[in-house]
Amino acid sequence: MKTRRTLTLMLLALWALGFDLAYAQRTKTDHQIAYYQALLQRNPRSAKAYFGLSDALIRKARETGDPSYFNRAEEALKKSLEIAPQNAGAMRHLAYVFYSRHEFAPAAVHARKAVEINPEDGDSYGVLGDALLEVGQYAEAQAAYNTMIELDESLYTYSRLAGLKSMRGDSAGAIADLERAIASGKAAKQPAESIAWAEWQLGSDLFARGNIVKAEAYYKQSLETYPNYYRGLSGMAQVRTAQKRYDESIGLYQKAISVIPMPEYIAALGDVYENIGRADEARKQYELVEYIGKLSNVGDGRDRPLLYNRELAYFYADHDIKLTEALDLAKRELDYRKDIYAYDLLAWSLYRNGKADDARDAIEKALKLGTKDAKLFYHAGMIHYRLGDLDKAKEFLKRALSTNPHFHILFADTAAQTLTQLERETEQANVARGGDEG
């Protein structure tokens, strides 16, 4: 009930700001939910029906981005496991629910239980690898994925391998695996949203490498596979922003937000408004980011991580506001996750708080896997610039812009301007040095 009330308040906030909310028509997934609910009315002791209901609820959560469906799925899965404790599929689904809510420790625990029940279930190893990946246990995640791919080759296995390869800087390998994932998903007639997710992810990987044309093609493909898909809409908005087609970008972000008000989409919309001089509109979006971030982070009495902790901390640091709170959130995030982006968030928050010396160690840990992410390179460049290490600053800022010159509507320009300033300072230093020698 708490999550439903939170979502309602979020939607009311959007309505008050003039968003045209997209209430979806009943889908195939809605009919499946109703079907299993009807079965359970006739037989409330059917473990199979509870499992079927949970599967449909999880799919609905993925389709809409509404986390309340994960909570309902958890209830159904626990009832299914009360009746049939040795159901590996139900245990795996429960692990996935925990993972989706960023409860990575219980996700790993339940995934391992699923593996114990059925060591031949590749999907259980996949969820285990996902949970380990999110907390920075990369070697253990790789081992889980290796077992997964030995047992099964599917959309889900290839997309997971792609994620780890991308993290380790193997861009070509990640893209190839996502192409395999899409082909496998289509051949196996997997759910449309699952295929659309892989298409969106491939678009995102291509965008991150600066390939705007191909990224656009896959974002469009994801929207053809699953119309009005909020991820595909946000991806297209990012492309239109990079192309400086700002009116179209605004419209696409608004459509994505009307489906699910994700803080990162709202912040991106605010940044577009800020860039084109519509400061009042930008301010409204920025206020909404904080409202939704904090509203969604209100607990329900259970010991859970904050859902948008990372997004809110990045938002504060990116916009140079509430920096003490940003650093506090970053430290809490690192205590919980310890992946490379937790270290990046800490580094960026320390930098914004004037603690560049402390930020250096954190950014080195963020870069340790060789991830090719322009945002990481930009943060590293700015930190080294603050430290006075001009050579490293130039190196990282060049890498940021060569990796993706459109990586952020505001920071890409900052990176280019800072690099120009660095080049000028280096030239002046060389001239001065030459004069001294003469």
Image: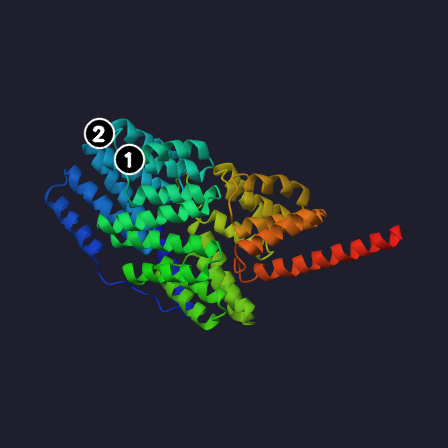
Q: Tell me the crowding category of disc 1: few under 14, some 14 to 19, or many 20 or more residues within 10 angstroms, Cα based.
A: many
Q: Which residue is mark 2?
A: 86
Say what secondary structure mark 2 lies in: loop
In this picture the colour scheme is rainbow
Residue 187 lies, in percent from the top left, at 23, 49
Rendered residue at 28%/50% (across/down): 183
Which residue type does callout 2 highlight?
A: Gln
What is the crowding at mark 2: few (fewer than 14 residues within 10 Å), some, or many (at least 20)? some
Instruction: Say which quarter of the image contains residue 115.
Output: top left
The residue where tag 1 is placed is: 122
Quarter residue 256 falls in: bottom left
Q: Residue placed farthest to the front in the image?
A: 438
Q: Position of residue 219 (x, y in %)?
A: 37, 60
What residue sits 27% from the left and 28% below the top?
Answer: 119
Dot placed on the residue nearer the N-terminal end, 2 or 1? 2
Type of the residue with mark 1? Gly
Residue visible at 20% across and 41% down?
51
